[in-house]
Image: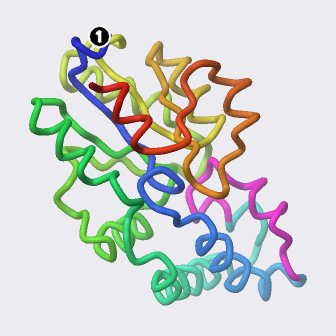
């Protein structure tokens, strides 16, 4: 199958970089004052799948625009806690590109937070496409299909690399193989193995061998 690979699409948070802890911290600090109580990690994680405007609207009914601006400000400030991508991920992407594989980014992040991260990690020019999230729901299946249509590819010519169970499910709905990224501290390896048996990778080196 990898001999036919034409497109590799990557998730961002927990796959390209360890951005999930500081995303949760930023969200809690920014949104808790508007929610009227200190948000728990569980409350925040329950909103995952939406982009940040959607996440905030799910918790805050009034003044959500102010909460969103506070979130973006704190997210940018706290990005000092994540100054580099995971070691080995950029060389892997560059190697794929050198073989003529199209490499795209499909993330659930909003356009603004995605742009902040790409700039902070100096990855602005790494991807052929950058497709961001939606405030109404997880649209990764639709976004994968959009890329297949754009490049005239069959599902078996594409893979999606992501760290969440929802990434595996979105890929499967699109008929695309998911390579589950389990190298971040926040990855739920057991749940990934249950959702995507035989395609869970605990290191970038292990993932790279799949492409070899």
Residue drawn at (53%, 35%) of the image: 201
Number of numbered discs: 1
Image coords of residue 77 (percent x, y): 49, 89
Q: Nearer the viewer, residue 63 or 192?
A: 192
Instruction: Determine which quarter of the picture holds residue 186.
Output: bottom right
- The residue range painted magenta reads 38-55
- Say left or right for 124 vs 134: left
Image coords of residue 102 (percent x, y): 19, 34
Q: Nearer the viewer, residue 1 or 11?
A: 1
- Say left or right for 202 vs 7: right
Give above or below for 2 relative to 74.
Answer: above
Which residue corresponds to mark 1? 154
Q: Nearer the viewer, residue 7 or 33?
A: 7
Image coords of residue 100 (percent x, y): 10, 30
Residue drawn at (18%, 40%) of the image: 95
Q: Quadrant of the C terminus?
A: top left
Image coords of residue 203 (percent x, y): 49, 44
Residue drawn at (67%, 78%) of the image: 25
């Amino acid at each position: 199958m990898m001999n036919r690979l034409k497109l590799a699409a990557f998730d961002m948070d927990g796959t390209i970089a360890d951005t999930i802890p500081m995303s949760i911290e930023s969200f809690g600090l920014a949104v808790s004052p508007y929610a009227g109580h200190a948000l728990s990690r569980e409350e925040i994680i329950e909103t995952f799948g939406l982009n940040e405007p959607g996440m905030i609207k799910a918790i805050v009914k009034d003044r959500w625009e102010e909460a969103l601006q506070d979130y973006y400000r704190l997210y940018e400030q706290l990005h000092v806690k994540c100054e580099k991508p995971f070691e080995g991920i950029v060389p892997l992407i560059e190697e794929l590109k050198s073989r003529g594989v199209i490499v795209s980014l499909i993330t659930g992040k909003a356009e603004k937070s995605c742009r902040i991260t790409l700039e902070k990690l100096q990855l602005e020019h790494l991807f052929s496409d950058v497709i961001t999230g939606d405030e109404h729901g997880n649209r990764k299946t639709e976004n994968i299909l959009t890329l297949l249509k754009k490049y005239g590819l069959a599902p078996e010519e594409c893979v999606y690399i992501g760290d969440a169970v929802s990434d595996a499910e979105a890929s499967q709905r699109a008929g695309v193989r998911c390579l589950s990224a389990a190298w971040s501290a926040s990855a739920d390896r057991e749940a990934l193995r249950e959702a995507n048996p035989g395609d869970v990778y605990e290191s970038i080196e292990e993932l790279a061998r799949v492409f070899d």
